[in-house]
Image (cartoon, rainbow, N blue to C red):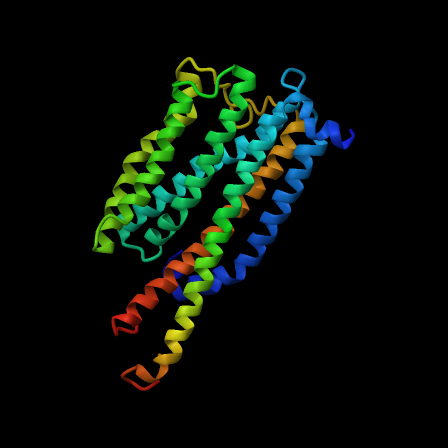
Amino acid sequence: MNGQAFLAMGGYARFVWPAYGVAAAVLLILAVWSLASYRRVKRDLAAREEKSPRKRKGPRGR
Amino acid sequence: MARLANPTQFLKLSAALLPWCAAAAALGLGLGLYLALFVAPPDYQQGEAVRIMYVHVPSAWMASLVYAVMAAGSAVGLIWRHPLAHIAAEAAAPLGAGFTLICLVSGSLWGEPMWGTWWVWDARLTSVLVLFFLYLGFIALEHAFDDKSRGTRAAAILALVGVVNLPIIKFSVDWWNTLHQPASVFRLGGPTIAASMLWPLMVMAAGFLFFFAALLLIRMRSALMEARLRALAFGNPG
């Protein structure tokens, strides 16, 4: 199958490619969003714990 | 399972599992895409349009599966007050909504050339649309209260009520007249779909499943760290 015929999808290109495009876009958005908020909270938590180290705060002085 | 109740244990275990889930997701989706577009044969009736199946069917399976995960997490959270259960349910919800959206859009794009319509208000399509709104309702309720725990409870109750929709989706194609075809993979008597199409479908479905698992773990880790951050902000290092 040559490239042109592949892209044409037997005349169904305008249905097949948008279906794959929407799937890719939704999965990508979910992944990027989840990873970005993961990195942000990780960074915030590290900064916070540096400011008030947990170890020195315990009543038993662990 | 009892040891997983401990968030510290979960953070350790999830850190170990994450790279494997992510690798399996990348492999499954990559290989699945290749098989779906280049290896799987065109259908004798549908021609190349049948390739929509390889995104439509896995996303449809995931839409229901993720809802079951969300409802199970909500139930465990409500009944046993397991600290991770609500976190799992809330981490799953946007992922399930995403899969449902893919299912609806790709189904519509498949319906137009094959049935001659983008949409019909039949039992299968309508019940999946309801599923989409259940996900959105869950997410909205979760954030609808100033008191986070009230939002969590309200959303969890909605998730449990919505469980009735799952068997309706599954059996809608048998109970009512519909344009949608009946099950051809998970059915009594085994799959009726050709092996040359079944394998690409299964690989793609595995890719979707591991994609969900990886993102679920990441989102649960985020939520746990966020809770810790809140505790620190209120001067209560827990």
Q: Which of the 4 image quadrants contains residue B159? A: top left
* In the foreground, B157 or B79: B157
Q: Which of the 4 image quadrants contains residue B7? A: bottom left
At which x and y percent is residue B100?
Answer: 44, 35
Residue B41, visible in the rendered structure: yes
Q: Which of the 4 image quadrants contains residue B162? A: top left
In the rendered view, would you say B133 is above or below A58? above
* In the foreground, A25 or B93: A25
Q: Is residue B25 left or right of residue B93?
A: right
Q: Quadrant of the N terminus of chain A?
A: top right
At which x and y percent is residue A41?
Answer: 41, 64
**Residue that sits furthest to the bottom in the current view:** A61
Q: Is residue B92 left or right of residue B194?
A: left
Q: Residue at x 34, y 68 (%)?
A: B229
All told, the count of numbered labels is 0
Q: Is residue B161 left or right of residue A51?
A: left
Q: Residue at x 30, y 66 (%)?
A: B230
Residue A53, visible in the rendered structure: no
At which x and y percent is residue B40?
Answer: 69, 29
In the rendered view, would you say A41 is above or below A48? above
Q: Quadrant of the C terminus of chain A?
A: bottom left
**Residue that sits furthest to the right in the current view:** A2
At which x and y percent is residue A21?
Answer: 57, 37
* In the foreground, B236 or B189: B236
Q: Residue at x 35, y 54 (%)?
A: B87
Q: Is residue A37 left or right of residue B58?
A: left
* In the foreground, B143 or B161: B143
